[in-house]
Image (cartoon, rainbow, N blue to C red):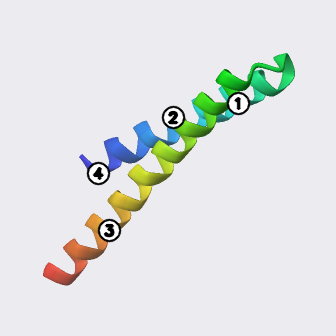
Amino acid sequence: MSLENRVQATAKNIEGKVQEAVGNVTGDPQAQAEGKAKQVEASTIHVVENVKDEVKKIID
């Protein structure tokens, strides 16, 4: 499941970067903000998965 979450987070990060770039090109601040929010969400998922991995290493 961890790998699946990481893949989804990476896809969301890419989607956010594209959306932010489109917002920059079109001058749409809402698209820029939504793109940045998706990137933050993806980053948070990656951090959570890293913490899970570290905890698992300690337990094992």
Q: How many marks?
A: 4
Mark 3 nearby-residue class (10 Å; few <14, some 14–19, many ≥20): few
The 10 Å Cα crowd at callout 2, few under 14, some 14 to 19, many 20 or more, is some
Q: Nearer the viewer, mark 1 or mark 4?
A: 1
Provide residue 48's location: percent of width, then percent of height: 34, 59
Q: Amino acid at mark 4?
A: Ser
Which residue position holds label 3?
51
The residue that appears at 53% across and 36% down in the rendered structure is 38
Whichever of labels 2 and 3 marks the residue nearer the N terminus, that label is 2
Residue at position x 64%, y 32% from top? 33
Q: Nearer the viewer, mark 3 or mark 1?
A: 1
Question: What residue sits right under mark 1 in the picture?
Answer: 20
Distance from Cα at disc 2 to Cα at disc 3:
20 Å
Q: Position of residue 17 (x, y in %)?
A: 67, 35
Q: Nearer the viewer, residue 59 or 47?
A: 47
Determine the image quadrant of residue 4: top left
Depth-wise, is mark 2 or mark 1 nearer the camera? 1
- Side of 34 where 7 appears, left or right: left
Q: Secondary structure at mark 3?
A: helix
